[in-house]
Amino acid sequence: MLVVMSSYATEEEINQVLAAIQRHGYVAREIRGGERTAIGILQNRGPIDPAPFLLLPGVKECIPVSKPYKLVSREFDMVDTIIQLGDVAIGGDNFVLVAGPCAVESETQALTIAEAVKSQGASIFRGGAYKPRTSPYSFQGLGEEGLKILAKVRDETGLYIVTEALDHERCDLVEEYADIIQIGARNMQNFSLLNRAGEAKKPVLLKRGMAATIQEWLMAAEYIMAKGNPDVILCERGVRTFADHSRNTLDLSAIPVVKKETHLPIIVDPSHACGRRDQVIPMSRASVAAGAHGLMVEVHHEPEMALSDGPQALLPSQFTEMVEAILPILTDKQRARLLESRDQQAA
Ligand code: PEP
Ligand code: MN
């Protein structure tokens, strides 16, 4: 159950509720939101009677939560979370385009791709400075040098930056440079990293683990929110199946399910789902049609030279084609916004 405090509740009233929860033998977890404080009642074995808490001063309502995830659930917040980065809004009825290379390889590479995707209406630039690679002999990313290049991309283009934090230790550095901290599929249940991201003052893009159920994914998001970070963006990137005609299998049905279960935004990464550039445009169209709040797509101007994931990177001209292909599927408002930001770049 969640005890939601009124926005006028005093510290003393909050402390009284915490004490009352403990007196009843439960564990209380305080969650400070932007407008109000909620207190989760944890470790209850059965249903909780809200009566003793409802009557306490400062309490607005008690919400029974039937799901194992609480803060991420629709029961906690019926209104879609909208994450704002300057004038870029993620969630609700907004649509966001995130694009860039798999890995930051050089300043020239990053800036060339950033200019290309920006000209087509992308507002967030992606690129790994720390890469989770299957082989220890593969390119591992440029590290802090890559982060500095990303900062330069932001300075020169005005694009916001999303980049992966591979581990707890380097999360400080990523938080310092990035606008959004990415947690990759392989780390979706790295609980120490999730806890660290929960303490971050930046939004977190949480990829779905490659064999994770939606419940496990939402529980991972719950870790981040429970530590106090309300800004979590979910990213569907395909799951492992028996199919071998694509790198992973894009689980399109995750989009409506996630939108029903949680107020958090969900975007789709068709690049890692497909693993081949010829599948990326059709799957982008399908993701938009299924209601995704955005797309995250890998783009490279010289994919045959890419140090990682070249086969799935769209050429800049194909990224332009992709934008043209999704335009008719977007809502009128989303289309107008995307065209507006594209026109602004062209002007
Ligand atoms: C990435 O987006 O750079 C990445 C490594 O993706 P994933 O974690 O989904 O494999
Ligand atoms: Mn990649």
Image: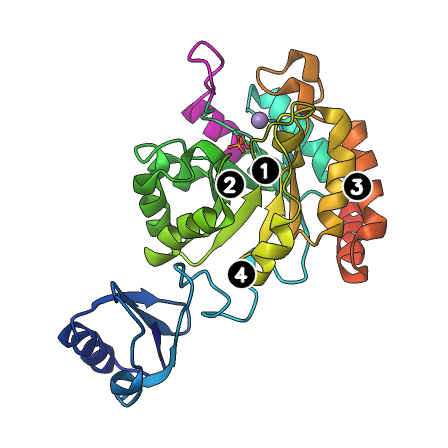
Q: Is residue 226 visible?
A: yes
Q: Is residue 23 left or right of residue 140?
A: left
Residue at 32% of width from left, 42% of height from top? 191
Q: Considering only order in the chain, which callout, 2 or 4, is on the residue closer to the N terminus?
A: 2
Q: CA distance from mark 1 to mark 2?
A: 7 Å
Name the residue type under label 2.
Lys
Q: Earlier in the sequence, mark 1 or mark 4?
A: 1
User: Could you say which is closer to the camera, residue 204 or residue 338?
Assistant: 204
User: Range of the magenta residues?
Assistant: 133-151
Separation (CA) of disc 1 from disc 4? 18 Å
Asked whether mark 1 lies closer than 8 Å to ligand 1, one says yes
* Residue named by callout 3: 323
Kindly check if marks 1 and 2 are in contact, taking CB atoms under 8 A apart as contact. Answer: yes
- On screen, 146 above or below 205? above
Crowd rating for badge 1 (residues with CA inside 10 Å; few <14, some 14–19, many 20+) = many
Q: How many marks?
A: 4
Kindly state the secondary structure of the residue where label 4 is placed: helix
The residue at the point 57 percent across, 65 percent down is 80
Q: For ligand 1, tell me if the residue under mark 2 lies within 8 Å.
A: yes
Residue type indicated by callout 4: Glu
Q: Which residue is mark 2?
A: 207
Check disc 4: other Cα within 10 Å, few if <14, some if 14-19, many if 20+: some
Q: Residue at x 78, y 46 (%)?
A: 342
What residue is shown with label 4?
Answer: 261
Disc 2 to disc 3, how far (Cα)? 23 Å
What residue sits 43% from the left and 51% below the top? 221
- For disc 2, the neighbor class at 10 Å (few under 14, some 14 to 19, many from 20) is many
Residue 315 coordinates in the image, percent (x, y): 75, 25
In space, the residues marked 4 and 2 are separated at their CA atoms by 17 Å
Which residue bears the numbered disc 1? Answer: 237
In the depicted structure, whether residue 226 falls above or below residue 39: above
